Image (cartoon, rainbow, N blue to C red):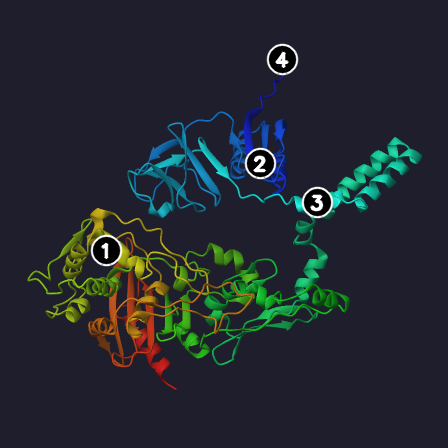
Amino acid sequence: MPRKTQPQPLQEVVEAEGHLIDSHIMEQIFDTVIEHQGRFEVEHFHIGRTNADPSRLRLRVESPDRARFEKMLAQLHALGCAPVEEQDARFARVERDRCAPEDFYSTTNHRTLVRRGGQWHEVRNQRMDAVIVWEDGQPWARRLRDIRAGDEIVVGMQGIRVIPESKERDRLAFAFMSNGISSERQVETAVRQTAALLGRGLLVLLATLLLVTGYWAVVRADSLRAYPTNPRRVIAERQLVRGRILGRSGEVLARSVPDAQGYMRREYPYPDEAAPVIGYADLKLGTSALEAVCNAALRGEVNMDWRSQLWRDLIHAPQRGQDVSITLDSRLQILAQRLLAGQRGAIVLVDTHTGAVLALASAPTYAPERIAEDWDELRASPDAPLLNRATQGLTQPGGALSTVILGLALQRQLDLTLREDFTRTITLEGVPYACQGEPTPDWAGLLRAQCPAPLVSLADQLGYEHLVEGLTAWGLTQAPAFDLPTVGHDWHPRRMALDAEALGQGDLLVTPLHLAGVVAVLGNDGVRPPLHLLREAQPGCTVPARTSQRLLSADEAAFLRGTWSAWGVALGHLSQAQAGPGRTVSWFLGLNSAQVPRYGVVVMLDNPPSPSYAARIAQILLYAATGP
């Protein structure tokens, strides 16, 4: 009977460089090979001789299974391992917008280099889970949804080098070893004496025991303490009394209460209404939103010296956090969230004079007290209830951008005289954009009818550089500075697409929070106040610095308010944006008054039941804000 031959294992020689030992990267490399049932052989290892010198590792890895081998190489690549035989990266052309080849390379959040033409090029705008696009002689990290037909992107892992972050060596931490009375030297002497008495076998056993215990007590001490199933950590977390989160009038929005066993659980008096702002705090899932931003303060980890920590441990007192006060008005927040019932959208209500956010709603939403039970269902839902659409829901601004375009024209003192063809239709990528109704021959009438031609004319007068500079100055091209996590669009405007950008139908994407800043400028006589949730800066809350910025004169702000239409007791601008096939986004930007503006609102609805539905929501909310 012929003998069955074993398949030859797949092999690759990889190299890594950096502070591999101090940052535990080498340990992760070895663990990765073993986890994938592979084998490794260290061909060369050089330890840096000073704290500035990197270590270098050359490793031969192998696996008999191709699927495991490729997955292992991908994870090693993310840890900074690169093949010894350097080759240029492979590129492929994108055939359709937002459709990448099947084997496109997905980036990590570590510094990444791409080899082309025998030269290494650092990837610009590094971000996680992006593709690498070659543009203008440089590699750029770009979201999958932002790639366009004809883009040249990296495929496979060939010619890619990842450089993980590493810790610097701190040799002072081992300075005690040079001390003549070091306890380490005493242990060493004791070990030698014991070895002389008990023999070499006991010495080997003791040395092994010291290595194992030392490894877990020193090298892996932090990870052991933080291990999720560590009983001491679990008990301490369940006994922790997190601080309360208090609303504008002192109402409780989140607190810790004991359960039937005496352990603490998080309670939210307004679970469905306040979730987009408050977030959740769960032992398994961690924290989100304000619970995450102020986690250190809510846990009581601020200004805790070693004496207080020692005394608390001695008397077994539970850890207690500090209260956090915010500007959210529970009455207005409940109303805003209920007005969004059955819709997909968001609302931001602000005090335009101070920048205080009074309501921030997103729909659909979730119940934070049931986050662990509902987690899988929430993550799988196509409606994305975990997404805060007010701060992270990027979409086209459409006609909502017209106020900013007109503001830029005022800043540049452009000629605002209307031409005879101000009602003409503008066609973008085969889609016609025309006036919605019969406009009056003034800017108020043109904005009310959403006429595109005058805005395109202003964009032509502004030019590419001034348009980009202006939109950046108004804070629309980056993530807004705010007390909750926010996002901004990685905007790369095309010179030949000024018409689309001026109509809010180009590559620029914004969130309702971006446009809340625009409304605040008009309501605060041209000065953009710092939008914020915390009543005041508080240690233990990771929030940006608060700064104001004048963008318009008071007269220019009044002129722009005059272009908005009256909606009952409110003043505002209603517009639409085409956000994709079968998707229309309705925007309403409003103020409570033209003469005495104080409260501003932004309403964004995805495929609303009627074009004016967003305006009706804003009217109700502004009336409630100005009422008793």
Q: Nearer the viewer, residue 414 or 97?
A: 414
- For the residue carrying disc 3, how many other residues have a C-alpha within 10 Å: few (<14), some (14-19), or many (20+)? few
Work out whether residue 554 or residue 102 is closer to the camera in this orientation and state it: 554
Corner quadrant of residue 504: bottom left
- In front: mark 4 or mark 2? 2
- As helix, strand or loop, the secondary structure at mark 4 comes to loop
Q: Do the residues labelled 4 and 3 touch (CB within 8 Å)?
A: no
List x then y, in percent, for residue 284: 60, 58
- Residue 78: x %, y % from top left: 52, 39
Cα–Cα span, label 2 and label 3:
19 Å
Q: How far is mark 4 from mark 2, CA to CA?
A: 52 Å
In this picture, is 259 found above or below 432?
below
Left/right placement of residue 322 relative to residue 362 reads right
Gap in Å between the C-alphas at discs 1 and 2?
A: 46 Å
Q: Could you tell me which secondary element the residue under label 2 belongs to?
A: loop
Residue identified by numbered label 4 = 2
Q: What residue do we see at 76% from left, 41% from top? A: 212
Disc 1 or 4, which lies upstream in sequence? 4
Given the image, on which type of amino acid does mark 4 rest? Pro
Q: Which amino acid does label 2 sit on?
A: Pro
Q: Mark 3 points at which residue?
A: 174
Q: Please tell me whether mark 1 or mark 4 is closer to you in this view.
A: 1
